[in-house]
Amino acid sequence: MERLPNLSVFATVIGLAKAAIKFAAHIQLQGNAMNWKNTTDRYGSPSIGMHWLMFFLLTGAYVCINLADVFPKGSQLRGNLKTWHYLLGLCVWALVVIRLGIRFLSGPPPGIEPQISLWQRRLAGVMHVALYVFMIAMPLLGWLALSAKGLPIEIFGLQLPALIGPDKALAESIGDIHETIGAAGYYLIGMHAAAALFHHYVICDNTLVRMLPLGR
Ligand code: HEM
Ligand code: HEM
């Protein structure tokens, strides 16, 4: 019985990924044939589903940790919001592995029309790598920071193993790195989203539409 909550957390992660992919596929079906892989002008449904699911998970992780500060230290709500932050962050970590697999199985990304210059393609590529590094590094740093604090890491019934032994100074350093990269994440994600909107509304190409389930 002890293990039931653990299983339900993992089942939730897989369920979320499946639901997002199905949802993207369902919406895509309304205007286009469903694509499991990238086509010449659109990302495949699994890539689109994972992109937007992870957008919501990351937004949730940021909202929870910022909202936690609003409530007094030691309050139940503050503690719960922090636990949700850990859980959503760990979901990002679990799903990024599946997402990378999907990326490699989906074939070359759809082309942008009208074509963009080589330096813009390279810059977008560097940005995507940075976003993947962010999604892998942040949860890991958070988990390491909690481990180094030496407290039991209990997430709604899921007991996480400590990755390293207790070390107060190390816990503070890793925590600082986690918070600094977390703050940099606002700019990274903000620039990425602004570039997509700039392409859509100013350059008027299909950069954003390729990643939208409705494809409008
Ligand atoms: C992509 C996922 C994640 C992002 C974007 C993220 C982002 C952040 C940010 C921005 C803060 C600083 C908040 C502030 O300045 O007050 C923070 C704090 C923190 N995060 Fe994360 N985080 C993620 C995942 C995780 C995970 C998976 C864990 C642990 C399992 C974790 C543990 C922590 C801890 C312990 C703090 C310090 C806050 C405290 O409890 O006092 N984070 N995180
Ligand atoms: C409002 C927010 C967002 C918008 C409008 C947006 C838009 C887009 C668009 C249009 C693309 C396709 C770009 C291309 O093919 O060159 C894309 C790709 C990508 N986006 Fe976002 N995005 C947003 C948020 C995020 C967030 C929060 C992350 C993760 C931290 C992220 C990670 C990625 C990655 C890694 C790619 C590369 C394609 C892939 O592997 O899935 N995006 N995004």
Image: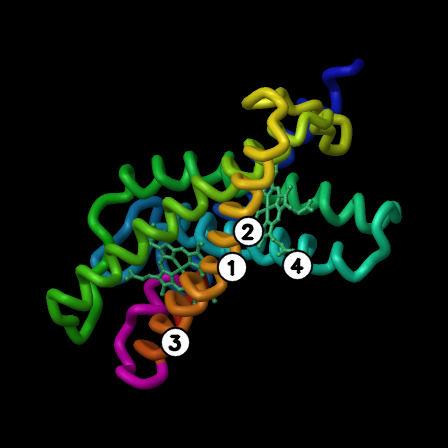
Q: Quadrant of residue 83?
A: top right
Q: Residue at x 47, y 51 (%)?
A: 49
Question: Is the residue 209 above or below the residue 46 in the image?
Answer: below
Q: Which circle marks residue 179 in the picture?
A: 2
What is the spatial separation of the Cα atoms under label 4 and label 1, in whole angstroms? Answer: 13 Å
| Residue in the foreground of this view, choosing between 182 and 189 | 182
Which residue is label 3 attached to? 197
Residue 26: x and y, percent?
Answer: 50, 54
Q: Quadrant of residue 62?
A: bottom right
Residue 59: x and y, percent?
Answer: 58, 58
Q: Residue at x 27, y 39 (%)?
A: 104
Amino acid at pointer 4: Val
Q: Which residues are magenta?
A: 201-211
Q: Earlier in the sequence, mark 4 or mark 2?
A: 4
Badge 1 element: helix
The verdict on label 2 being within 8 Å of ligand 1 is: yes
Q: Earlier in the sequence, mark 2 or mark 3?
A: 2
Residue 22 seen in this snapshot: no
Amino acid at pointer 2: Glu
Q: Residue at x 41, y 46 (%)?
A: 46
What is the spatial separation of the Cα atoms under label 1 and label 3, in whole angstroms? Answer: 22 Å
Look at discs 2 and 3 and give the one toward the viewer: 2
Which residue is label 1 attached to? 183
Badge 2 element: helix
Look at discs 4 and 1 and give the one toward the viewer: 1
The verdict on label 3 being within 8 Å of ligand 2 is: yes
Q: Residues within 10 Å of mark 3 (few under 14, many from 20)?
A: some
Which residue is label 4 attached to? 63
Q: Earlier in the sequence, mark 3 or mark 4?
A: 4
Residue 150: x and y, percent?
Answer: 68, 26
Question: Is the residue 148 above or below the residue 93 in the image?
Answer: above
Badge 3 element: helix
